[in-house]
Image (tube, rainbow, N blue to C red):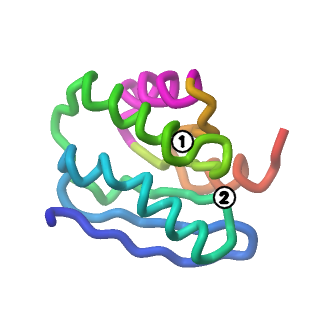
Amino acid sequence: MVSSFSVIQKNKHLVMTIRGTYDYWEFLELPHHILQECEDHQCYKILVDLNPVIAKDIALIELFFLGEKIAEVLGKTVMIALVWKSESLSDFLVDVATNRSARLKVFATNKRAQYWLLNEY
C-alpha cells in the first residue's frame, strides 16, 4: 500500500485525509472505503482532503474510471467534497461522476469544501 487515510468526525460531516503516493488501483477502491466510513459513522457528507497525496501525471482515462467508480459506489447517497490542488484535471473527474448522478464537487480549500457540504442548495 502506497497511501493511507484517516477519518475524523466533525459536527455534521466526516473528514478523510489521504496521505502517500497516488496509485490508480488503490484509488479505485477509495469509494468503497468512503462508503464504509459513512455507514460506520451514519454520516453521509464527507470532505476528502487529497492535498497530502503525491501525484504526478494522472491519465484522463484513469480519471474517467475513477469518476465512474465514484458514481457507481456512492451514487446520490454520499455527498463528497474533494480538496485537490489539480483543478484542471478535477473538472473532468467531476463531469464524469456528476453525469452519472454522483454528488461530488472539487475545491481548492477545506473551508470552501466544508461550506458546500454544510449548506445545501
The quadrant of the image that shows the N terminus is bottom left
Query: What is the distance, in whole Å, between disc 1 and disc 2 at their CAs?
Result: 15 Å
Which callout, 1 or 2, points at the residue further toward the start of the chain? 2
Identified by mark 1, the residue type is: Phe
Identify the magenta region: 85-99
Q: What's the amino acid at mark 2? A: Lys
Q: Is residue 66 magenta?
A: no
Asked which secondary structure carries label 2, the reply is strand
Residue 45's label in the rendered image is 2
The percent coordinates of residue 84 (x first, y second) are 42, 45
What residue is at 56 percent from the left and 26 percent from the top?
100
Q: Quadrant of residue 111?
A: bottom right
In the depicted view, which residue is nearer to us: 93 or 31?
A: 31
Horizontal and vertical percent position of residue 47: 56, 57
Number of other residues with Cα within 10 Å of mark 1, as a class: few under 14, some 14 to 19, many 20 or more? many
Relative to 81, does residue 63 appear above or below in the rendering?
A: above
